[in-house]
Amino acid sequence: MRKTTGNERHVRAEIAAERRELASLFDGLSPAQWDAPSLCAGWRVREVVAHMSLGFRRSLPMTLLDIVKAGGSLHRMTDRRARADAAAYPPARLAAYIRDNAHHPWTPPVGGYTSALAHDVVHGLDVTVALGLDRAVPAERLRIPLGAVDTKSLRFFGADLTGVALHADDLDWSYGSGIPVRGAAQDLLLVAFGRKVPPGRLRGEGCERYLLR
């Protein structure tokens, strides 16, 4: 059996902390906030949270069957599943799934625990940024998914950084080359994951294409 490394233990501890913090935040949302749009196109907050808990509730064989039913499309499967589960479970249950599975070992198909942390952090931001909530992801936690941004992840999430360099104001982090786009590191992480952010959160000549309209 492969031994768990110190880095893996650290990342898993950050995953657990992120899930517990987000679950407490979700518990405090109003019904209107649960039905409000998120930064994930076409998903309300409740679809995002339902999606975040998918890996805890459905086994790998069930997930593979869902993908087959979706014509082999992972994105189509996750969209269908999020909508179905958001309708099936009340908000309190969805939040509890996140809290009760803080230490669950689920990881995405690629990327291991670092990708699992990125999954939770980005989807948490999909909710908090869209709702205008003032939550800052701890800097040391944020550094982990930022450090995993590369050409493969950009392509997977449909993020076009052609001719643009992302520069964080609050962390020593940058990515890319070209016209500088500046902002808080967590907002730049959203850009790197294919999201658009509300106006006023980014600066630079090339930032317009990453802003919500």
Image: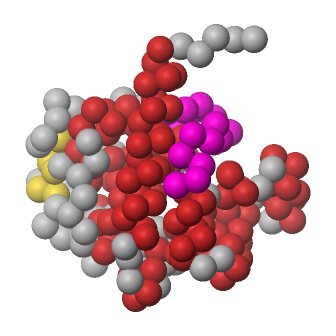
Left or right: residue 70 versus residue 152 is right
State which quarter of the image contains the N terminus: top right
Left or right: residue 154 versus residue 180 is right
- Residue at 46%, 18% (x, y): give it: 7
Instruction: Say how many tags the image has.
Output: 0
Residue 114 visible, this angle: yes
Q: Is residue 174 above or below residue 179?
A: above
**Residue reaching furthest to the bottom:** 32
Identify the magenta region: 99-115
- Name the one closer to the observer, 165 or 25: 25
Left or right: residue 155 versus residue 167 is right
Residue 194 visible, this angle: no
Res. 205 image quadrant: bottom left
| Magenta highlight: main SS | loop
- Residue at 57%, 40% (x, y): give it: 103
* Whole-percent x, y for residue 191 in the image: 33, 53
* Whole-percent x, y for residue 15 in the image: 47, 40
Q: Is residue 120 above or below residue 175?
A: below
Q: Is residue 127 above or below residue 138?
A: below
* Whole-percent x, y for residue 75 in the image: 66, 60
- Name the one closer to the observer, 123 or 94: 94
- Residue at 64%, 11% (x, y): give it: 3
Q: Residue 101 lies in magenta, yes or no? A: yes
Q: Residue 203 lies in magenta, yes or no? A: no
Res. 63 image quadrant: bottom right
* Whole-percent x, y for residue 199 in the image: 18, 70
State which quarter of the image contains the C terminus: bottom left
What is the basis of the colouring in this image?
secondary structure
- Residue at 29%, 66% (x, y): give it: 129
